[in-house]
């Protein structure tokens, strides 16, 4: 049976439903993820676009990322939660903020990127492939 998961913003008016297992769970220590989350890092759960269905009104914030690529974040216009995003680095994929699932048993990350910006006190209790910056497109697949 296919795993169905739901994630939503703080006020509940924007949500996403996923089917199946994620392609990747990654920790990102880049400065933009630190700013987006207000934390020392962000955790992205990547699914193929066809595995993701969104519901509710969202607003888009687009920014230029590494190597002049674009990243488009969908956030709730009511509460401001940045719930999911798409990046030129991973075409055909959607990332969802891990914390929005509200599931402490969610799959652990397998990759840690932008390690050059990792706060020295951040440690994880799982094995992570570590990349000094973003993984290349080839490594990201």
Image (cartoon, rainbow, N blue to C red):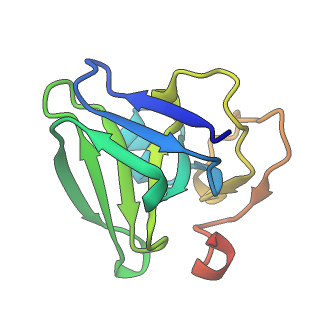
Q: Nearer the viewer, residue 115 or 1?
A: 1
Q: Residue 81: x, y in percent?
A: 29, 31
Residue furthest toward the front?
Answer: 1
Residue at point 73% right, 38% down? Answer: 108
- Of 107 and 1, the residue lying toward us: 1
Left or right, residue 30 beside residue 83: right
* Quarter residue 41 falls in: top right
Residue drawn at x 68%, y 39% as measured from the top left: 1
Task: Give the answer, above or below, for where 135 lies relative to 35.
Answer: below
| Most foreground residue, 117 or 24 | 24
User: Dividing the image into 4 quarters, which one contains the C terminus?
Assistant: bottom right
Instruction: Judge left or right: residue 128 versus residue 41.
Output: right
Residue 14 location (% of width, % of height): 26, 32
Considering depth in this image, is 121 or 44 the residue closer to the camera? 44
Q: Is residue 22 left or right of residue 67?
A: right
Asked whether residue 39 appears in the rendered view, the answer is no
Residue 63 visible at all: yes
Q: Quadrant of residue 50?
A: bottom left
Query: x%, y% of residue 23?
Result: 64, 57
**Image vertical order of residue 127 relative to residue 50, above or below:** above
Q: Position of residue 123 (x, y in %)?
A: 76, 35
Residue occupying the point 79% across, 51% down: 128
Q: How many marks?
A: 0
Residue at left offset 20%, top offset 35%? 56
């Amino acid at each position: 049976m296919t795993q169905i998961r739901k994630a939503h913003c703080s006020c509940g008016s924007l949500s996403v439903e996923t089917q199946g297992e994620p392609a990747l769970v990654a920790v990102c220590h880049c400065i933009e993820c630190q700013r987006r989350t207000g934390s020392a890092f962000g955790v992205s759960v990547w699914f193929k676009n066809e595995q993701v269905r969104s519901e509710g009104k969202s607003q888009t914030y687009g920014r230029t990322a590494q190597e002049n690529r674009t990243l488009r974040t969908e956030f709730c216009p009511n509460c401001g939660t940045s719930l999911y995003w798409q990046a030129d680095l991973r075409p055909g994929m959607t990332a969802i903020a891990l914390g929005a699932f509200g599931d402490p048993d969610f799959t652990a990350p397998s990759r840690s990127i932008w390690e050059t910006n990792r706060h020295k006190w951040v440690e994880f209790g799982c094995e992570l492939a570590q990349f000094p910056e973003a993984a290349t497109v080839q490594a990201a697949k």
